[in-house]
Structure formats: structure tokens, C-alpha cells
Image (tube, helix red, strand yellow):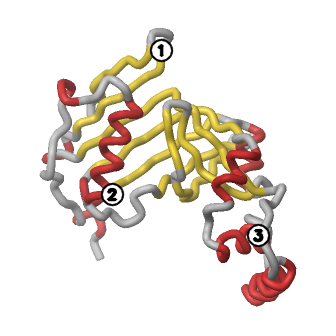
Amino acid sequence: MDIAALRREYTQDGLHRQTLDPNPYQQFSRWLTQAIEAKVLEPTAMQLATVSATGKPTLRTVLLKSFDADGLVFYTNYKSQKAQQIAENPQIALLLFWKELERQVEITGRAEKIPTLESLRYFATRPRGSQLGAWVSAQSSIITSRSLLEIKLEEMKRKFSAGDIPLPDFWGGYRVIPDSFEFWQGRPNRLHDRFEYQRSADGWEIGRLAP
């Protein structure tokens, strides 16, 4: 297969400076709403890039669970590789790609743990199976077989068979406080529209980037 010959033109839409919201959170909210309404598969899926203290980069997918003017929130195991790298270097990058709309948003900024009470409120809304899963998985650690996870799951079901499942002390959220947003809209001939919002002392500065 000649993968070099695989290509498609992006023709759905354009992005114009005069139609951009001056606030990147409002622009992000507009695009996310449109992605949800278009029934994009996993519209809140974000690629999260972290870098260790030694400069080793790692990339994985997490789910956006909330956002407001303070930042964007996702949840994870605080003993995972991503959490360890964030502790070593809190500067991260996020990428949301909505291929059905020929759009993507790149965000850079700083990640910090959210208050335990905020994590608890979210944890209480999760399905019981997901709550149990948080207790079962020692995320990023090496295991010998899937059966170990299934055995531990049954143990956790028995342990928490009565009442609510408590929040694990090793599980919670991070808030990403953005320094920049880039909104990318695919266009024909690879001349894509790209607009970057950079945080400044006076708010946000917007510039068009060459594709």
C-alpha cells in the first residue's frame, strides 16, 4: 500500500478573524457544542502530552470532564505515568481533533491538581463500575494478565457491596490553565486556517498563523 498517496481535501468550512470570539473559552465552547451536535465520536477526547524531568515525552488520550474560565479539567490516577510527569514538569499540551468537522484545537498550559472536594463531587456522579475500576487499576504499572484485574474487581465488589464507593486517595482531577489556544480549520490545498490566542497581561491576543 502506498500510504504517501493517501490524501483528502478539506472543504467543509473556513475560519475568519471577524467571526472569532475574543474569548478563547467562548470560541472553544462554540466548537465543542457543534462537535457534540454533529455526533462526533468522543467529542471530549483530548490527546494529553507530558514531558518528564529528563525530557522524555509521553502522549495518551484523556476525556475532558468540565471547563470554565479557570481552565479545563480531566481525571486520572495520581500514581500514573502522566501524574508523575506532571509532578516533574507541569507544562502540558492538549489536542482535540474532530475529524468529522475537519477541525482541531491545540491548548498549551500548566496542569495542577484540583481540590479533593471537587474530585469527590465528580467521582460521586460516575457509574458504579467506573468507580470500582478506579480502585482496581494501578494505572501504568506492569501486570501479568487481565485475569488479575478481574479478580481484583470481584474483591472490590465484595468490599464495597454495601453503601457508596469512597473516593480513592490516589485518584482525582487536574485543571489545565491555558497559556494558548490554537483553532485549526482544514482548508483546500493544505492552506488551512489557523488562529492562535496567546495570553497577555491585558487578556488574549489573537493572530493568524501560516498553515
Give the residue at the far front of this rendering.
163
Would residue 43 be seen by someone viewing this image from the given angle?
yes
Please rate how many residues cluster around mark 1, counting C-alpha atoms within 10 Å: few if below 14, some from 14 to 19, many from 20: few
* Circle 2/circle 3 CB separation < 8 Å: no
How far across and down, in percent of the image, does residue 137 sit? Answer: 76, 71
CA distance for labels 3 and 1: 45 Å
For the C terminus, the quadrant is top left
Q: Which residue is mark 2?
A: 36
How far across and down, in percent of the image, does residue 4 sit? Answer: 28, 63
Q: Which residue is mark 3?
A: 164
Would residue 144 be seen by someone viewing this image from the given angle?
no
Q: Nearer the viewer, residue 60 or 21?
A: 21
Which circle's residue, 3 or 1, is located before the other in the chain? 3
* Amino acid residing under circle 2: Ile
* Circle 1/circle 2 CB separation < 8 Å: no
Residue at 84% from the left image edge and 85% from the top image edge? 158
Secondary element at image label 1: strand
* Circle 3/circle 1 CB separation < 8 Å: no
* Amino acid residing under circle 1: Ser
Please rate how many residues cluster around mark 3, counting C-alpha atoms within 10 Å: few if below 14, some from 14 to 19, many from 20: few
CA distance for labels 1 and 2: 30 Å
